[in-house]
Image (tube, helix red, strand yellow):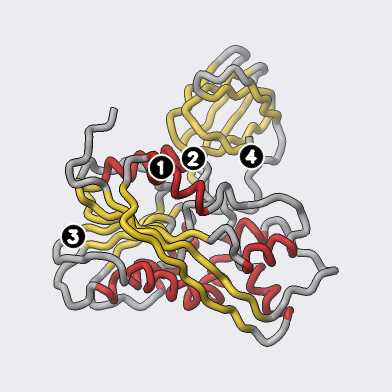
Amino acid sequence: MNILGDNVGHRIIDAGCKSPGDCVDISAGRYAIWLVDGQATWQKGNSRKVEPINASDTLYELTGPGTLQFLEQSHYVRLEAGDALGFGPRASLYHMLMETRNRGIGEALAAGLSLHARQIWVDIGTGTGAMVQAIQERGAELGPLWIFGVDQAMNMIDEAWLSPQGRIPAWFVVRDVSAMPWPNGMVDGITALLLLHLVEDIDALLARLYGALKPGGTFAYAVSSDQNPFVRMVMRQLARPGDFFKRGQRQVRESVLRAGFDVLRSDVYQDEIVLANPEAMRNLIGSIGAAASRGLRNDIAPPPTIVREFDLVWAQKPAAAPRRG
């Protein structure tokens, strides 16, 4: 069970008072629970593990399905969880410092897409919209395209709406892509720019994406390479230990293949961040959600110049995709 920190965008789903022995069934998805008083336990799915939830000022993150059982008379509030990755509070700074740099990765990924008029494309974990803009530019001469950017961080979506619209319009939606309902076999293409190494349950997400795509539909993504010098530098700067990445590029690809996708091709993308001094690099690191939420060390100065390296992958749902149970 993870404690939610300085996240924003929570939406109240329900609240109430429960007596000892009362239970609340939590459906699939990611939620936050605030126990105002009393005591409860959380049991996820069929797991035998029971975790305590105590009254405090803390929001507890729960990933359903599961059951809340109340041990004492308790007042509680259940919320749809906001930005667990911590980007929301830093959205404006991230947009200013990282948008142009991430656009380069998005343009390289978009260059390998096969776009056609009247297709539906969805960019998940869209952030401030760098990948959406790359698709807009790539398909500018094709005629109508429907492009959607989805992210759970409301502040990041607000920043995405501020970006100039291209000749092809796009729509931005605040939703958790791991919990939102997806249409079955209706989407032509899905992109994920610098997201999949951060997702908690990648297999569940990929199963949803696989189902949403038409047979022959495209799934293209970019993740940090396992040898990315930028990430290694960021990790050295964190004041609190722990890797905020859930998995590396090889593990991501294994999950993509396990979901049923065919990998058509991959490429390595490199760029270089060149700043005036170490303090400017420190400010840039401070715009990155999960990393910045751990705080930065003051006793180690980051270099003002660093190389970034990413794995770009173009995959496809088989044209004669087997039905998945």
Q: Nearer the viewer, mark 1 or mark 4?
A: 1
Picture quarter containing residue 116?
A: bottom left
Tell me: residue 37, above or below residue 122: above
Left or right of 252, for residue 134: left
Q: Nearer the viewer, mark 3 or mark 4?
A: 3
Q: CA distance from mark 1 to mark 3?
A: 22 Å
Look at the numbered discs 1 and 2 and tell me whether their residues touch, using CB distance below 8 Å: yes
Tell me what residue is drawn at x 50 percent, y 76 percent: 101
Residue 224 locus on image (x, y percent): 53, 61
Tell me: residue 206, above or below residue 121: above
The residue tagged 2 is 201
Q: Quarter holding the N terminus?
A: top right
Identify the mark nearer the N-term, 1 or 4: 4
Q: Residue furthest bottom?
A: 276
The residue tagged 3 is 119
Mark 1 surroundings within 10 Å by alpha-carbon count, few (fewer than 14), some (14 through 19), many (20 or more):
some
The residue tagged 4 is 2
Picture quarter containing residue 150?
A: bottom left
Is disc 2 placed on a helix, strand or loop?
A: loop
